[in-house]
Image (cartoon, rainbow, N blue to C red):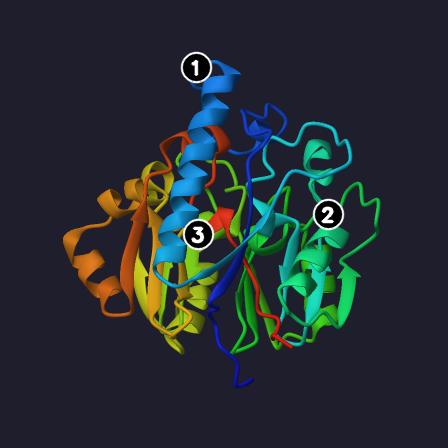
Amino acid sequence: MLDVSRTTDTVLMVRPHDFGFNEETGQDNEFQHPLELSETEINQNANAEFQAMVDTLRQEGVTVLILEKPARDYPRTPDAIFPNNWFSTEHDGTLITYPMAAVSRRYERRPEDVEKLLLAHGYKIRNVIHVGALDERERFLEGTGSMVIDHRAEVVYAARSHRCHEAQFDNFIRLRFYREGILFDTRSSSGRPIYHTNVIMSIGERFAVICLECIADPAQRERVKTSLEQSFEVIDISLDQMENNFCGNILQVNSAGGRPLIVMSRRAEQGFTPSQLERLARYGKILAVSLDTIEQVGGGSARCMMAEIFSEKK
């Protein structure tokens, strides 16, 4: 196993200049719901929630890099607030971009701007690579939305869906030389595949939160559970907690001084049982932020808003 951290003290976030309901992604994201507000009101609410989250993270000593509105004209990108779907970074200084399922989300990919931002803040970039074809039309893999990566154990977990193609997942495992890729099938309360893996599970340094209930196949469920138990205390959440409170969409980060923090929405905090919160608190300070508009309209929560930066500083 690699002697690397599973968590980081630096995240990149994208200001939601075009935030709003995306009918295209709403076709398979059952977490998205329109609000009876004007587009202007929705956008203002989302920007306020975004800035409050940035301020909270920075007050706790987390380095937050913000990718602002692009200088050049782009088509509308209502989901740009969720950057971890189109790029990720690794400890060796590699910046990776991914094939996105929704046409409207492909315009979010701004690797040159991310590279400039990271270099400007002293982070090393050794390689920039793209998974799959640049104009991929069928085999999608939406970054750390589709995959939850255990960097230390070199194991990658992924729920099969329209946004996580089995062949592309296998391609990623081979490309990055991960030791094992664990692909499994999920089922929501309506019987449909869950659109992203990171809404059903999250791993920190020593804990894992997962909704085992949504893994329909008993053999797959046992394989995932057994694998996680080798490295983590497993906190199992219900389908209701996952679907209605985003309890799986949380992320452990660190302060600049190394203090562990567990970031989640206020809705997730309210969805966890007191016992589960007590168990989580053993691994870090719980940092809950209000994301009501972003969660309802965008169908993603706190974890989706943060792209982890694992690249070393110069």
User: Which residue is disc 3 drawn over?
Assistant: 215
Q: State which mark lies toward you, 2 or 3.
A: 2
User: Which residue is disc 2 drawn over?
Assistant: 110
Residue 51 visible in the displayed image: yes
Determine the CA span between mark 1 and mark 2.
30 Å
Quarter of image, res 168: bottom right
Determine the CA span between mark 2 and mark 3.
34 Å
Q: Quadrant of the N terminus?
A: bottom right
Quarter of image, res 218: bottom left
Residue 131 in the image, given as x and y percentages of width and height: 76, 58
Would you say 109 lies left or right of 51 here? right
Q: Quadrant of the C terminus?
A: bottom right
Q: Earlier in the sequence, mark 1 or mark 2?
A: 1
Q: State which mark lies toward you, 1 or 3.
A: 1
Q: Earlier in the sequence, mark 2 or mark 3?
A: 2
Whether tag 1 and tag 3 are in contact, CB under 8 A, the answer is: no
Residue 116 in the image, given as x and y percentages of width and height: 72, 57
Judge the density around disc 3: few (<14), some (14-19), many (≥20) Cα neighbours within 10 Å: many
Number of disc labels = 3
Residue 91 in the image: above or below residue 219 = below
> What residue is rendered at 50% in x and 25% in y?
43
265, 43: nearer the viewer: 43
34, 293: nearer the viewer: 293
Kind of residue at disc 3 = Ile
Would you say 177 lies left or right of 205 here? right
Q: Secondary structure at mark 1?
A: loop
User: Which residue is disc 1 drawn over?
Assistant: 37
Kind of residue at disc 2 = Arg
Residue 160 visible in the displayed image: no
Judge the density around disc 1: few (<14), some (14-19), many (≥20) Cα neighbours within 10 Å: few
Determine the CA span between mark 1 and mark 3.
35 Å
Residue 53 in the image, given as x and y percentages of width and height: 40, 46
